[in-house]
């Protein structure tokens, strides 16, 4: 089965836009690289390298279809627990992609942003990240967010620390804190609300990814392994999103009345 809806995507509880005009912010959990390689009799790292072409494909698709922001889960804070050789290859691949892709992204009007706890990376890699972010900072065709050493719980805790520090310094009071203020301190503060979260590889969980941002997102799961994910599969996910009724706590009848 190519794609499945999650029951979790059907329930929302605050008032929001009733109509669907295509997702503006899409996030993808890029899962299945290792299994793809193993099916071909290769080592797991072969799949990670093959998955780079799928990244290029989804960036092309996002630019062509008017998606404003694309967030890709490249390396989670839990991935450090993987075999040392695999982690090492992932870091090398991250370096290589930054070297080879940053100029391509810039040429195509894509702004690159890396979200996550970069303190765990060596200074050389962080320097490359900042250089690529600076080079592409003026681009507006698409914001490409790479989540590296990222965890949804880390994001929430980090935002809470920032808010607490502002209260401590007298820059705001407890009464000033609401959802909007808290959101301004998350990794995706400058981006549109997350509309659609896609996970490849057949697993049906979000694995500590964008926990705060997923509150009202539609979830789409596909059995397609990441190296096989292309523009056609991406289109299936968007098509599925476009026929869903996003109720945000309202009834279907209320939505129908508002749109008539």
Image: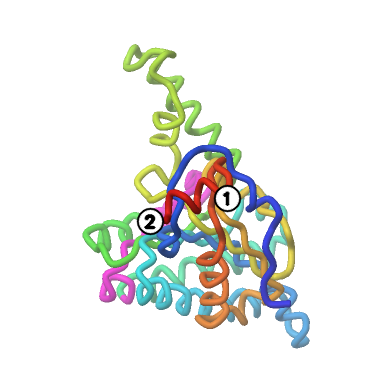
- Whether pointer 1 and pointer 2 mark residues with C-beta atoms closer than 8 Å, the reply is no
Image quarter in which the N terminus is found? bottom right
- Secondary structure found at label 2: strand
Query: How far across and how far down the image is residue 180, in percent?
Result: 41, 32
Which residue sits at x=49%, y=26%?
161
**Which image quarter is the C terminus in?**
bottom left
Few, some or many residues within 10 Å of mark 1 (<14, 14–19, 20+): few
Q: In this rendering, would 107 be left or right of 239?
A: left
Q: How is this picture coloured?
A: rainbow
**Residue 139's image quarter?**
bottom left
| Location of residue 240 with respect to 187 vertically, above or below | below
Foreground mark, 1 or 2? 1
Left or right position of 6 against 110: right
Residue 125 horizontal/vertical position (percent): 44, 58
Whether 62 is drawn above or below 134: the answer is: below
Residue found 66% across the figure and 53% down from its top: 206
- The image quadrant that residue 230 belongs to is bottom right
Question: How dense is the environment of label 2, judged by Cα within 10 Å: few (below 14), some, or many (20 and up)?
Answer: many
Is residue 113 shown in magenta?
Answer: yes
Residue that mark 2 sits on: 113
Q: Earlier in the sequence, mark 1 or mark 2?
A: 2
- Mark 1 vs mark 2, CA separation in Å: 37 Å
- Horizontal side, residue 39 vs residue 257: left or right: right
Task: Confirm whether the magenta stretch covers residue 108.
Answer: yes
Region in magenta: 104-128
In the image, residue 15 lies at what x, y percent?
48, 39
Secondary element at image label 1? helix
For residue 175, what is the image quadrant? top left
The residue singled out by tag 1 in the image is 252
- Residue 34, image x, y percentages: 71, 73
* Residue at image point 39% right, 50% down: 192
At 25% from the left edge and 62% from the top edge, which residue is drawn?
A: 140
């Amino acid at each position: 089965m190519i794609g499945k809806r999650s029951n979790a995507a059907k329930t929302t509880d605050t008032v929001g836009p009733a109509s669907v005009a295509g997702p503006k912010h899409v996030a993808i959990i890029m899962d299945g690289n290792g299994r793809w390689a193993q099916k071909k009799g290769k080592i797991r790292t072969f799949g990670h390298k093959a998955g780079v072409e799928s990244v290029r494909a989804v960036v092309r698709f996002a630019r062509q279809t008017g998606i404003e922001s694309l967030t890709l889960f490249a390396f989670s804070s839990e991935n450090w627990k993987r075999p040392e050789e695999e982690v090492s290859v992932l870091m090398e691949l991250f370096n290589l992609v930054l070297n080879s892709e940053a100029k391509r992204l810039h040429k195509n009007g894509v702004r690159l942003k890396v979200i996550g706890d970069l303190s765990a990376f060596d200074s050389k890699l962080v320097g490359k990240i900042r250089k690529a972010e600076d080079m592409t900072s003026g681009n507006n065709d698409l914001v490409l967010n790479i989540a590296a050493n990222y965890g949804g719980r880390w994001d929430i805790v980090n935002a809470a620390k920032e808010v607490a520090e502002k209260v401590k310094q007298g820059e705001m009071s407890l009464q000033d804190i609401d959802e909007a203020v808290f959101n301004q301190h998350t990794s995706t503060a400058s981006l549109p609300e997350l509309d659609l979260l896609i996970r490849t590889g057949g697993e049906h969980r979000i694995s500590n990814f964008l926990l705060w941002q997923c509150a009202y997102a539609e979830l789409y799961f596909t059995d397609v392994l990441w190296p096989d994910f292309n523009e056609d599969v991406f289109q299936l996910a968007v098509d599925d999103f476009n026929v869903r009724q996003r109720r945000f706590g309202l009834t279907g009848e209320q939505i129908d009345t508002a749109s008539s």
